[in-house]
Amino acid sequence: MMTENFVFSRRLACIRAPLVAALFLTLTSCHSTDPLSEPTGVDDRPIPGETDDPSLAVAWAGGIPFGVFALPTSQLGSTYNGVVRNARIWVETGGAANFKNQLAAIKSKNAKVFLQLTGHHQYYLDSDGHFSMTKWKDRLNMFKSIDFSSYINDGTIIAHYLIDEPNDPKNFGGIKVSPATVEAMAKYSKQLWPGMATVARSESSYFVSSSISYQYLDAAWAQYATRKGDVFDFINRNVADAQKEGLALVTGLNVDKGGDSGANMTATQIKTFGSALLSSSYPCAFISWEYHDTLEVYLASTAVQDAMKSLRAKAQNRNYKTCKS
Protein backbone atom coordinates (compact mmCIF):
# COMPACT_ATOMS: atom_id res chain seq x y z
CA MET A 1 0.00 0.00 0.00
CA MET A 2 1.29 3.45 -0.86
CA THR A 3 2.27 5.75 1.96
CA GLU A 4 1.37 9.41 2.22
CA ASN A 5 4.99 10.32 1.54
CA PHE A 6 4.97 8.24 -1.64
CA VAL A 7 1.81 9.93 -2.85
CA PHE A 8 3.23 13.35 -2.10
CA SER A 9 6.42 12.49 -3.95
CA ARG A 10 4.44 11.19 -6.89
CA ARG A 11 2.48 14.40 -7.25
CA LEU A 12 5.58 16.55 -6.66
CA ALA A 13 7.41 14.66 -9.38
CA CYS A 14 4.55 15.31 -11.75
CA ILE A 15 4.64 19.02 -10.94
CA ARG A 16 8.40 19.23 -11.45
CA ALA A 17 8.59 17.03 -14.55
CA PRO A 18 10.05 18.90 -17.50
CA LEU A 19 7.69 20.04 -20.19
CA VAL A 20 8.38 18.58 -23.60
CA ALA A 21 5.56 19.83 -25.79
CA ALA A 22 4.90 20.20 -29.47
CA LEU A 23 1.85 21.68 -31.12
CA PHE A 24 0.66 20.21 -34.41
CA LEU A 25 -2.06 22.16 -36.26
CA THR A 26 -3.97 21.12 -39.37
CA LEU A 27 -13.04 10.61 -28.23
CA THR A 28 -16.70 10.34 -24.50
CA SER A 29 -19.58 8.21 -25.28
CA CYS A 30 -20.01 4.96 -27.16
CA HIS A 31 -23.47 6.16 -28.21
CA SER A 32 -22.50 9.66 -29.38
CA THR A 33 -19.47 20.80 -35.55
CA ASP A 34 -18.75 23.69 -34.24
CA PRO A 35 -16.24 25.99 -35.98
CA LEU A 36 -12.66 25.16 -35.00
CA SER A 37 -10.53 27.62 -33.11
CA GLU A 38 -6.87 27.63 -32.17
CA PRO A 39 -6.02 25.74 -28.95
CA THR A 40 -4.94 27.93 -26.07
CA GLY A 41 -3.17 27.26 -22.82
CA VAL A 42 -3.32 23.47 -22.72
CA ASP A 43 0.37 22.55 -22.75
CA ASP A 44 1.97 24.80 -20.17
CA ARG A 45 2.19 22.16 -17.44
CA PRO A 46 3.94 18.79 -17.06
CA ILE A 47 3.08 15.83 -19.24
CA PRO A 48 2.74 12.56 -17.26
CA GLY A 49 4.92 9.70 -18.40
CA GLU A 50 6.79 11.55 -21.15
CA THR A 51 10.28 10.40 -21.99
CA ASP A 52 12.69 10.68 -24.88
CA ASP A 53 13.80 7.07 -24.38
CA PRO A 54 11.12 4.41 -25.05
CA SER A 55 13.07 1.85 -23.06
CA LEU A 56 9.98 -0.28 -22.50
CA ALA A 57 8.88 -0.22 -26.11
CA VAL A 58 9.41 -3.31 -28.25
CA ALA A 59 10.62 -2.37 -31.74
CA TRP A 60 8.46 0.72 -31.29
CA ALA A 61 8.02 3.03 -34.27
CA GLY A 62 7.90 6.06 -32.00
CA GLY A 63 5.24 8.40 -30.70
CA ILE A 64 2.04 7.43 -28.90
CA PRO A 65 -0.11 4.38 -29.67
CA PHE A 66 -2.69 5.02 -32.39
CA GLY A 67 -5.55 2.63 -33.06
CA VAL A 68 -9.15 1.47 -32.83
CA PHE A 69 -11.15 -0.43 -30.21
CA ALA A 70 -11.44 -4.19 -30.87
CA LEU A 71 -9.34 -4.06 -34.03
CA PRO A 72 -8.24 -7.59 -35.03
CA THR A 73 -4.57 -8.25 -34.45
CA SER A 74 -4.15 -9.03 -38.14
CA GLN A 75 -4.92 -5.38 -38.95
CA LEU A 76 -2.28 -3.93 -36.66
CA GLY A 77 0.72 -2.60 -38.52
CA SER A 78 1.57 0.44 -40.58
CA THR A 79 -1.55 2.47 -39.73
CA TYR A 80 -2.66 1.12 -36.37
CA ASN A 81 -0.36 0.18 -33.50
CA GLY A 82 -2.70 0.54 -30.52
CA VAL A 83 -5.87 -1.30 -29.55
CA VAL A 84 -8.32 -2.04 -26.73
CA ARG A 85 -9.09 -5.75 -26.41
CA ASN A 86 -11.43 -7.81 -24.22
CA ALA A 87 -8.91 -10.25 -22.74
CA ARG A 88 -11.61 -12.07 -20.80
CA ILE A 89 -12.73 -13.68 -24.07
CA TRP A 90 -9.19 -14.88 -24.75
CA VAL A 91 -9.15 -16.85 -21.51
CA GLU A 92 -12.70 -18.15 -21.81
CA THR A 93 -12.05 -19.48 -25.31
CA GLY A 94 -8.53 -20.85 -24.87
CA GLY A 95 -7.34 -20.51 -21.33
CA ALA A 96 -4.08 -18.99 -20.14
CA ALA A 97 -2.18 -20.27 -23.19
CA ASN A 98 -4.49 -18.39 -25.56
CA PHE A 99 -4.23 -15.26 -23.42
CA LYS A 100 -0.44 -15.28 -23.70
CA ASN A 101 -0.54 -16.19 -27.39
CA GLN A 102 -2.76 -13.19 -28.09
CA LEU A 103 -0.37 -10.87 -26.27
CA ALA A 104 2.57 -12.37 -28.12
CA ALA A 105 0.80 -11.80 -31.44
CA ILE A 106 0.17 -8.12 -30.61
CA LYS A 107 3.79 -7.73 -29.55
CA SER A 108 4.93 -9.32 -32.83
CA LYS A 109 3.06 -6.53 -34.65
CA ASN A 110 5.07 -3.93 -32.70
CA ALA A 111 1.79 -2.77 -31.20
CA LYS A 112 0.43 -2.06 -27.73
CA VAL A 113 -2.85 -2.96 -26.02
CA PHE A 114 -5.22 -1.72 -23.33
CA LEU A 115 -6.46 -4.88 -21.59
CA GLN A 116 -10.10 -5.08 -20.55
CA LEU A 117 -9.78 -7.98 -18.12
CA THR A 118 -13.31 -8.15 -16.69
CA GLY A 119 -15.32 -7.92 -19.91
CA HIS A 120 -18.66 -6.20 -20.43
CA HIS A 121 -20.17 -4.46 -17.42
CA GLN A 122 -23.30 -6.63 -17.57
CA TYR A 123 -21.30 -9.40 -15.92
CA TYR A 124 -20.54 -7.44 -12.77
CA LEU A 125 -23.92 -5.99 -11.86
CA ASP A 126 -25.83 -6.95 -8.72
CA SER A 127 -29.45 -8.11 -8.64
CA ASP A 128 -30.63 -4.50 -8.88
CA GLY A 129 -28.51 -3.83 -11.96
CA HIS A 130 -25.96 -1.72 -10.08
CA PHE A 131 -22.20 -2.04 -10.17
CA SER A 132 -20.90 -4.79 -7.89
CA MET A 133 -17.30 -4.46 -6.71
CA THR A 134 -17.45 -8.06 -5.46
CA LYS A 135 -18.41 -9.42 -8.87
CA TRP A 136 -15.88 -7.18 -10.62
CA LYS A 137 -13.10 -8.47 -8.37
CA ASP A 138 -14.22 -12.06 -8.88
CA ARG A 139 -13.89 -11.67 -12.63
CA LEU A 140 -10.51 -10.01 -12.28
CA ASN A 141 -9.22 -12.75 -9.98
CA MET A 142 -9.24 -15.19 -12.90
CA PHE A 143 -5.99 -13.60 -14.05
CA LYS A 144 -4.15 -13.86 -10.72
CA SER A 145 -2.75 -17.27 -11.65
CA ILE A 146 -1.46 -16.11 -15.06
CA ASP A 147 2.00 -14.61 -15.24
CA PHE A 148 1.94 -11.94 -17.93
CA SER A 149 4.37 -9.60 -16.20
CA SER A 150 6.80 -9.64 -19.12
CA TYR A 151 4.20 -7.91 -21.31
CA ILE A 152 3.68 -5.26 -18.65
CA ASN A 153 7.41 -4.72 -18.24
CA ASP A 154 8.19 -4.44 -21.95
CA GLY A 155 5.36 -1.98 -22.61
CA THR A 156 3.18 -4.24 -24.78
CA ILE A 157 0.36 -3.67 -22.27
CA ILE A 158 -0.40 0.04 -22.07
CA ALA A 159 -2.81 -0.17 -19.15
CA HIS A 160 -5.56 -2.11 -17.42
CA TYR A 161 -8.87 -0.83 -18.82
CA LEU A 162 -10.83 -0.88 -15.57
CA ILE A 163 -14.33 0.09 -16.65
CA ASP A 164 -16.25 1.65 -19.52
CA GLU A 165 -18.20 4.86 -18.91
CA PRO A 166 -18.61 4.75 -15.13
CA ASN A 167 -20.19 8.18 -15.49
CA ASP A 168 -23.17 6.83 -17.46
CA PRO A 169 -25.96 5.75 -15.07
CA LYS A 170 -27.72 3.88 -17.88
CA ASN A 171 -24.97 1.28 -17.72
CA PHE A 172 -25.44 0.61 -14.03
CA GLY A 173 -29.12 0.58 -13.21
CA GLY A 174 -29.45 4.34 -12.90
CA ILE A 175 -26.54 4.83 -10.49
CA LYS A 176 -23.14 6.05 -11.65
CA VAL A 177 -19.97 4.33 -10.52
CA SER A 178 -18.40 7.04 -8.40
CA PRO A 179 -14.85 8.34 -8.88
CA ALA A 180 -14.07 7.00 -5.39
CA THR A 181 -15.17 3.53 -6.48
CA VAL A 182 -13.08 3.75 -9.65
CA GLU A 183 -10.08 4.69 -7.49
CA ALA A 184 -10.80 1.62 -5.33
CA MET A 185 -10.87 -0.53 -8.47
CA ALA A 186 -7.52 0.90 -9.52
CA LYS A 187 -6.13 0.19 -6.05
CA TYR A 188 -7.16 -3.47 -6.26
CA SER A 189 -5.60 -3.74 -9.71
CA LYS A 190 -2.33 -2.27 -8.44
CA GLN A 191 -2.31 -4.74 -5.55
CA LEU A 192 -2.28 -7.54 -8.12
CA TRP A 193 -0.08 -5.89 -10.77
CA PRO A 194 1.78 -2.91 -9.30
CA GLY A 195 3.52 -2.05 -12.56
CA MET A 196 0.43 -1.96 -14.79
CA ALA A 197 -1.15 1.45 -15.37
CA THR A 198 -4.89 1.86 -14.81
CA VAL A 199 -7.40 3.75 -16.93
CA ALA A 200 -11.16 4.30 -16.88
CA ARG A 201 -13.01 5.47 -19.97
CA SER A 202 -14.60 8.67 -18.78
CA GLU A 203 -13.69 12.28 -19.38
CA SER A 204 -11.25 13.75 -16.90
CA SER A 205 -13.91 16.22 -15.76
CA TYR A 206 -15.70 13.28 -14.10
CA PHE A 207 -12.69 12.71 -11.87
CA VAL A 208 -12.26 16.30 -10.73
CA SER A 209 -12.91 16.21 -7.01
CA SER A 210 -11.60 18.10 -4.01
CA SER A 211 -12.10 15.06 -1.78
CA ILE A 212 -10.20 12.41 -3.76
CA SER A 213 -6.48 12.09 -4.27
CA TYR A 214 -5.87 9.63 -7.07
CA GLN A 215 -3.08 7.40 -5.85
CA TYR A 216 -3.93 4.40 -8.04
CA LEU A 217 -5.94 5.58 -11.04
CA ASP A 218 -3.50 6.68 -13.71
CA ALA A 219 -5.52 7.97 -16.65
CA ALA A 220 -8.85 9.33 -17.85
CA TRP A 221 -10.24 9.08 -21.38
CA ALA A 222 -11.46 11.90 -23.62
CA GLN A 223 -13.23 10.56 -26.70
CA TYR A 224 -14.61 13.17 -29.05
CA ALA A 225 -17.92 13.21 -30.94
CA THR A 226 -19.41 16.19 -32.76
CA ARG A 227 -22.14 16.50 -30.15
CA LYS A 228 -19.37 17.48 -27.69
CA GLY A 229 -19.05 20.90 -29.32
CA ASP A 230 -15.89 22.70 -30.30
CA VAL A 231 -13.09 20.15 -30.48
CA PHE A 232 -10.38 22.51 -29.22
CA ASP A 233 -12.51 23.47 -26.21
CA PHE A 234 -13.06 19.74 -25.63
CA ILE A 235 -9.39 18.79 -25.55
CA ASN A 236 -8.35 21.94 -23.67
CA ARG A 237 -10.89 21.23 -20.93
CA ASN A 238 -9.96 17.57 -20.61
CA VAL A 239 -6.24 18.30 -20.47
CA ALA A 240 -6.74 20.98 -17.83
CA ASP A 241 -8.90 18.67 -15.69
CA ALA A 242 -6.46 15.77 -16.07
CA GLN A 243 -3.58 18.03 -15.06
CA LYS A 244 -5.52 19.25 -12.06
CA GLU A 245 -5.89 15.69 -10.76
CA GLY A 246 -2.43 14.52 -11.82
CA LEU A 247 -3.88 12.06 -14.34
CA ALA A 248 -2.64 11.03 -17.75
CA LEU A 249 -5.12 11.24 -20.62
CA VAL A 250 -6.12 8.99 -23.53
CA THR A 251 -7.99 10.57 -26.40
CA GLY A 252 -9.53 9.55 -29.72
CA LEU A 253 -12.64 9.81 -31.90
CA ASN A 254 -16.02 8.11 -32.00
CA VAL A 255 -15.74 7.43 -35.72
CA ASP A 256 -18.62 4.94 -35.57
CA LYS A 257 -21.43 7.12 -34.19
CA GLY A 258 -19.75 10.41 -33.43
CA GLY A 259 -20.45 12.27 -36.66
CA ASP A 260 -23.34 14.56 -37.45
CA SER A 261 -26.67 13.21 -36.12
CA GLY A 262 -24.95 10.10 -34.81
CA ALA A 263 -23.62 8.95 -38.19
CA ASN A 264 -20.13 7.74 -39.06
CA MET A 265 -17.60 10.54 -39.14
CA THR A 266 -16.60 11.56 -42.63
CA ALA A 267 -12.97 11.26 -43.68
CA THR A 268 -12.67 15.05 -43.50
CA GLN A 269 -14.07 15.06 -39.96
CA ILE A 270 -11.66 12.32 -38.90
CA LYS A 271 -8.68 14.28 -40.19
CA THR A 272 -9.88 17.66 -38.90
CA PHE A 273 -11.04 16.62 -35.45
CA GLY A 274 -8.22 14.13 -34.97
CA SER A 275 -5.64 16.76 -35.85
CA ALA A 276 -7.22 19.09 -33.30
CA LEU A 277 -7.01 16.46 -30.56
CA LEU A 278 -3.41 15.76 -31.49
CA SER A 279 -2.59 19.47 -31.37
CA SER A 280 -2.19 18.82 -27.66
CA SER A 281 0.96 16.93 -26.73
CA TYR A 282 -0.56 15.82 -23.41
CA PRO A 283 -2.42 12.57 -24.38
CA CYS A 284 -0.55 9.29 -23.99
CA ALA A 285 -2.54 7.38 -26.65
CA PHE A 286 -5.09 7.95 -29.40
CA ILE A 287 -7.67 5.13 -29.65
CA SER A 288 -10.96 5.52 -31.54
CA TRP A 289 -14.32 3.78 -31.21
CA GLU A 290 -14.95 1.11 -32.61
CA TYR A 291 -14.18 -1.73 -34.99
CA HIS A 292 -16.98 -4.17 -35.79
CA ASP A 293 -18.05 -6.19 -38.82
CA THR A 294 -20.35 -3.54 -40.30
CA LEU A 295 -17.68 -0.85 -39.88
CA GLU A 296 -15.00 -2.85 -41.67
CA VAL A 297 -15.90 -1.55 -45.14
CA TYR A 298 -16.00 2.02 -43.85
CA LEU A 299 -12.53 1.75 -42.29
CA ALA A 300 -11.23 0.15 -45.48
CA SER A 301 -12.35 3.00 -47.75
CA THR A 302 -9.53 4.94 -49.37
CA ALA A 303 -10.60 8.29 -47.93
CA VAL A 304 -10.88 7.01 -44.35
CA GLN A 305 -7.59 5.13 -44.66
CA ASP A 306 -5.86 8.27 -45.86
CA ALA A 307 -7.29 10.28 -42.97
CA MET A 308 -6.19 7.63 -40.46
CA LYS A 309 -2.69 7.49 -41.95
CA SER A 310 -2.42 11.24 -41.63
CA LEU A 311 -3.33 11.03 -37.93
CA ARG A 312 -0.97 8.10 -37.37
CA ALA A 313 1.87 10.25 -38.71
CA LYS A 314 0.99 12.98 -36.21
CA ALA A 315 0.73 10.51 -33.34
CA GLN A 316 4.06 8.98 -34.30
CA ASN A 317 5.78 12.36 -34.34
CA ARG A 318 5.83 12.49 -30.55
CA ASN A 319 8.02 11.58 -27.65
CA TYR A 320 7.11 8.14 -26.38
CA LYS A 321 5.28 8.17 -23.06
CA THR A 322 3.48 5.78 -20.76
CA CYS A 323 -0.08 6.26 -19.53
CA LYS A 324 1.06 6.26 -15.92
CA SER A 325 0.35 9.40 -13.95
Image: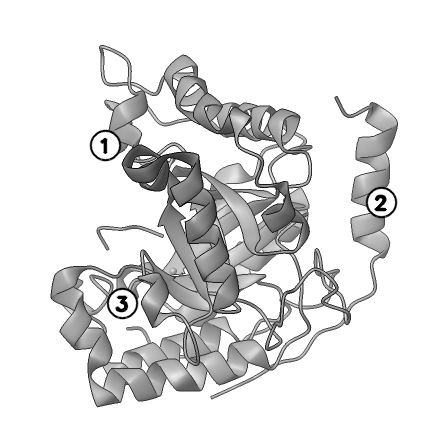
Q: Position of residue 211 (x, y in %)?
A: 63, 26
Residue 55 in the figure: left or right of residue 142: right
Q: Secondary structure at mark 3?
A: loop
CA separation, marks 2 and 1? 37 Å
* Residue of label 1: 170
CA separation, marks 1 and 3? 22 Å
Task: Tell me which corner region of the image, top left, top right, bottom left or bottom right, holds residue 128.
Answer: top left
Residue 190 in the figure: left or right of residue 223: right
The correct choice, above or below, for 80 with respect to 241 in the image is below
Q: Which numbered tag is attached to residue 219?
A: none
Q: Position of residue 76 (x, y in %)?
A: 39, 70
Whichever of callouts 2 and 3 sits on the residue coming sooner in the sequence is 2
Whichever of callouts 2 and 1 sits on the residue coming sooner in the sequence is 2
The correct choice, above or below, for 232 with respect to 12 in the image is below
Looking at the rendered structure, the kind of residue marked 1 is Lys
Which residue lies most toward the front here?
97
Q: Nearer the viewer, residue 80 or 214?
A: 80
